[in-house]
Amino acid sequence: AGLLRRGRLRRRRQPQPHSGSVLTLPLRPRKIRRQLRRSVASRMAAMRAQTLPSEDSEDSRVESASYGHLGSAELLAAPLEAPPAARSLQTPRALAQTPPARLVPASVPARVVETSALLCAAPHLAVPPSLPWGSPLQRVLAELNRIPNSRRRAARLFEWLITPMPPEHFYRRLWEREAVLVRRQDHAYYQGLFSTADLDAILRKEDVQFGQHLDAARYVNGRRETLNPPGRALPAAAWSLYQAGCSLRLLCPQAFSTTVWQFLAVLQEQFGSMAGSNIYLTPPNSQGFAPHYDDIEAFVLQLEGRKLWRVYRPRVPTEELALTSSPNFSQEDLGEPVLQTVLEPGDLLYFPRGFVHQAQCQDGVHSLHLTLSTYQRNTWGDFLEAVLPLAVQAAMEENVEFRRGLPRDFMDYMGAQHSDSKDPRRTAFMEKVRVLVARLGHFAPVDAVADQRAKDFIHDSLPPVLTDRERALSVYGLPIRWEAGQPVNVGAQLTTETEVHMLQDGIARLVGEGGHLFLYYTVENSRVYHLEEPKYLEIYPQQADAMELLLRSYPEFVRVGDLPCDSVEDQLSLATMLYDKGLLITKMPLTLN
């Protein structure tokens, strides 16, 4: 029984996304569990002391050089009343070439940053051959391929995305709070991520369907029109709609573009939440969509052309960090924008959920941008929405106070018609409710709900992208092949002396359900959202502590013979099962026996 009668999990587990199911896990006596925890902790401490010097030195080199690429970039986070140019370190020539952002005074300022994708899974993290040599994207991809820790790779890519702004400052002061503009004067910054040529190739080679994968829309005379014909979006139909003034929105480009998929697969580990994207191609002198706000944190990457953006703060407090997207607004519904600027290639715009925005092309130039989205329905409220019903259920089972009957006369002084009543019985009733609500925290199955949300995140996630090292040391790099009429190089096996760790940090989650333990994993996920059912392996109770050790010890290696199992057979069967599924890498390449 994993969910105690008090509503808590006996075994410690890590957090997870949505679900209301109650978890159950095998239980051991408390004293034995304490000893197991101490033994696992001591093993991890010993391994930390023996960390490979080569890996430590490589990680430290990456960290120490993390800001070496910024050059003469500058950071502006000034009040709106201060003219941007007054705080800029750009040369007059650079300023003349870059259209200024119009920052409209508001009660709380926007933030502006002025500065002078991407791996492959069980495709591996490599620089796509189409990328120009020496481009910023190509350089960061090459750097990511040398970082052995997947969490550090995600942090480095996010740092590259918002440079020169420090990520700590962004998360502490701006995330979920302010609109942010990063202007770079580097039109090649995102080069190779996605282009109009890529869109044309996708229309020609892939089964792109109107409405499912591609939308054609325009905003004319204050009204938005969606002009999706039925069936496949062949180039003739799509480009004719574009010529007629429609913006083309490619939904889920990661399903068609390897580079976009790689970009998102790395960043999802940074956010701890599903990362998605859309591509928007807008013809010159047009606008595709009406003003609106979204229910996601949005990062706009300008890839080609120019586009005028207007961003507005939430109109009323109830729209701040909105839980759902808004309907289309008219211009009369809007106030003054908090930020108005023209994005050029290489620029980045961020705005939180609930910030109204609209964008249009001008000056006879088209625009192509990618919107990266994350943090949809990933709030405290969503978490508590799953926790509280289970907490009430557990409290009613455990505590007689929750089973006592309501006062026979409570309808005489409770309800809207008695809301202004000074009846002391009403005061006592409200106090009783407050006391019981306060006690619910004691019964809340927080870890169980966290595990379910993490399980959902595993299902939402894109399949991982592998570095050259991860590919070479995992099952994907085994030299088994068909040659001369038979398979060759067969027979490599794990032994108790083999040292292993998980393929990446966030690719698997151990969850208890229905009296069983399941390891949910991402390596067989589809690039299309929820195309496949969740993938999992069943973990036997006698292997549970070994599985926990592997999950928590990443990126440190563990000898298979040191896994806390009851027998060598259990050690080898667990390690072999995980390795064969592509979930483990070895310290050295496996050799044939």
Image (cartoon, helix red, strand yellow):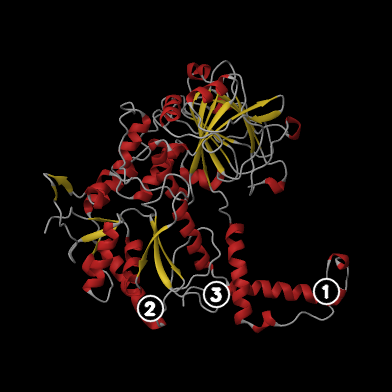
Asked whether residue 290 appears in the rendered view, the answer is yes
Compare residues 141 and 160 and report the one nearer the observer: 141
**Numbered disc in front, either 1 or 3:** 3
Reply above or below: 122 against 556: above
Q: Position of residue 183 (x, y in %)?
A: 50, 29
How many residues crowd around disc 1 within 10 Å: few (fewer than 14), some, or many (20 or more)? many
| C-alpha gap between disc 1 and disc 2 | 47 Å
SS at circle 2 = helix
The mark tally for this picture is 3
The residue at which mark 2 appears reads as 34
Residue type at mark 1?
Arg
Reply above or below: 51 against 343: below
Query: What numbered label is drawn on residue 426?
Result: 1
How many residues crowd around disc 2 within 10 Å: few (fewer than 14), some, or many (20 or more)? few
The residue at which mark 3 appears reads as 7
Residue type at mark 3?
Gly
Reply above or below: 248 against 293: above
Reply above or below: 196 against 32: above
Looking at marks 1 and 2 on the same chain, the residue that comes earlier in the sequence is marked by: 2
| C-alpha gap between disc 1 and disc 3 | 31 Å
Looking at the rendering, which quadrant does residue 178 occupy? top right
Q: Which residue is found at the position 49% from the left and 27% from the top?
A: 234
Q: Position of residue 447 (x, y in %)?
A: 50, 67
